[in-house]
């Protein structure tokens, strides 16, 4: 009998350790994932455009294809690379973070530049009729979305890796990144699915129901265009802020803290002027200057990325990535 009791005690102890480990993984995953807010918001804001013009019954299958490709991006390619970096080249994490941050700055600045230069001719894609192109256009849209997702996923996974304590074991890091990858993908593409179907739900309620439900449906239809515009603006601002912050912190970590110190001192000075909310004012001031620097860096990078980096990627890295994803069915049909 005493042996059984001892065994039960051991099982209980192991269960407590396992539960604590799961809580630790979940907690660190949430902390790491929230640091990638800029990339997450932008991912949710950008992806719905790939469903533009398709029949309503193809929207969710397209979201599923992109989500599946995103999981392949994160788990098959980026997670092993992140673990290799952590094990053999941790000194590369900061430079890679800075590259990812610079790319976020470029994306945000490019969106702002396009908002001033975009015309109907420039946005000719809005005149495409997907019904005439069929599956070929759908696969092209999905492939484009997965390529965009790869860049954002790389940034998300690198940010997450940088937030994991270095003393964690390789297995612990792998579990945290696994949770981040699955959680982020589920959150982003779950939100995308809700966004792209919101109009259909609103129209259905407005036309098939009466009373309060019909009014709710009309409200949803009217609300969604403004919501999408606000989401795009917030996503762009978040990209510039997060990208600028990553670059500024990276430069400081590499031994040149002048910009970081200047922003820190400015935040403290402004916070002193509003003693009622010093922490909030300091955060907003820091985010503002990080965003301004991010915008400036992004504008500088636009011609470099457009005319130099993107052509190189198109003929080297991206085809190799597409080949790896093809082995795992990342862009297959639904």
Image (cartoon, helix red, strand yellow):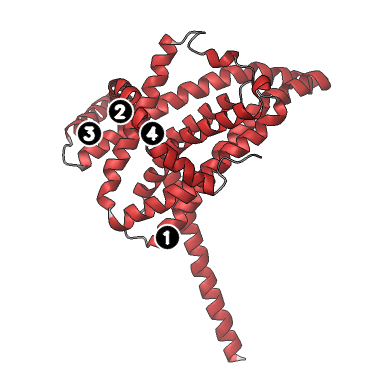
Of labels 3 and 1, earlier in sequence is 1
- Residue 178 higher or lower than 8, as above or below: above
Q: CA distance from mark 1 to mark 2?
A: 32 Å
The local secondary structure at tag 1 comes to: helix
Sequence order check: which comes first, mark 2 or mark 3?
3
In percent of the image, x 60 and y 17: which residue is there?
A: 225
Would you identify the image quadrant in which residue 321 lies? Answer: top left
Task: Tell me the residue at 41%/53% (across/down).
Answer: 80
Sequence-first disc among 4 and 1: 1
* Mark 3 to mark 4 CA distance (whole Å): 37 Å
Residue 315 numbered tag = 4
Of badges 3 and 1, the one in the foreground is: 1
Q: Residue at x 57, y 21 (%)?
A: 227
> Spatial distance from mark 2 to mark 3, Cα to Cα?
9 Å
How far apart in space, not on screen, are marks 3 and 1 (Cα)? 31 Å
Residue at the image position 22 percent from the left and 37 percent from the top: 251
Measured along the vertical axis of the image, is residue 29 above or below residue 317?
below
Q: Earlier in the sequence, mark 4 or mark 2?
A: 2
- Looking at the rendered image, the quarter that the N terminus falls into is bottom right
Q: Is residue 276 visible?
A: no
Q: Position of residue 283 (x, y in %)?
A: 34, 31
Which of 82/77 is in front?
A: 77
Q: Position of residue 198 (x, y in %)?
A: 67, 26
Residue 11, position in %: x, y? 56, 77
Which residue is at the front of the view, 81 or 2? 81
Give the numbered dot on residue 172: 1
- Pointer 4: residues within 10 angstroms few (<14), some, or many (20+)? few
- Which of discs 4 and 2 lies nearer the camera? The answer is 4
Q: Which residue is mark 3?
A: 260
């Amino acid at each position: 009998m005493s042996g059984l009791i001892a065994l039960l005690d051991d099982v209980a102890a192991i269960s407590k350790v396992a539960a604590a480990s799961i809580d630790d993984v979940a907690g660190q995953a949430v902390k790491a994932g929230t640091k990638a807010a800029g990339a997450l918001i932008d991912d949710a804001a950008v992806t719905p455009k790939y469903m533009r013009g398709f029949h309503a019954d193809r929207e969710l299958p397209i979201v599923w294809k992109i989500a599946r490709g995103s999981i392949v991006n994160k788990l098959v390619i980026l997670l092993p690379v992140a673990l290799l970096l952590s094990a053999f080249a941790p000194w590369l994490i900061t430079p890679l973070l800075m590259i990812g941050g610079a790319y976020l700055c470029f994306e945000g600045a490019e969106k702002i530049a396009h908002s001033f230069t975009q015309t109907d001719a420039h946005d000719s894609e809005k005149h495409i009729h997907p019904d005439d192109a069929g599956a070929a256009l759908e696969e092209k849209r999905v492939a484009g979305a997965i390529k965009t997702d790869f860049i954002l996923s790389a940034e998300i996974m690198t940010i997450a890796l940088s937030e994991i304590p270095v003393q964690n074991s390789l297995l612990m890091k792998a579990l945290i990144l696994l949770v981040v990858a699955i959680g982020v993908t589920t959150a982003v593409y779950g939100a995308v699915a809700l966004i792209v179907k919101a109009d259909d739900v609103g129209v259905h309620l407005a036309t098939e129901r009466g009373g309060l439900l019909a009014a709710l449906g009309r409200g949803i239809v009217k609300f969604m265009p403004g919501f999408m515009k606000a989401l795009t603006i917030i996503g762009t601002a978040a990209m510039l802020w997060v990208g600028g912050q990553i670059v500024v912190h990276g430069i400081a970590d590499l031994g040149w803290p002048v910009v970081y110190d200047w922003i820190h001192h400015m935040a403290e000075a402004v916070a002193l002027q509003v003693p009622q909310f010093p922490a909030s004012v300091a955060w907003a001031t820091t985010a503002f200057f990080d965003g301004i620097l991010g915008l400036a860096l992004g504008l500088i990078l636009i011609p470099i990325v457009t005319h130099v980096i993107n052509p190189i990627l198109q003929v080297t890295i991206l085809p190799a990535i597409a080949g790896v994803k093809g082995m795992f069915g990342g862009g297959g049909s639904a």
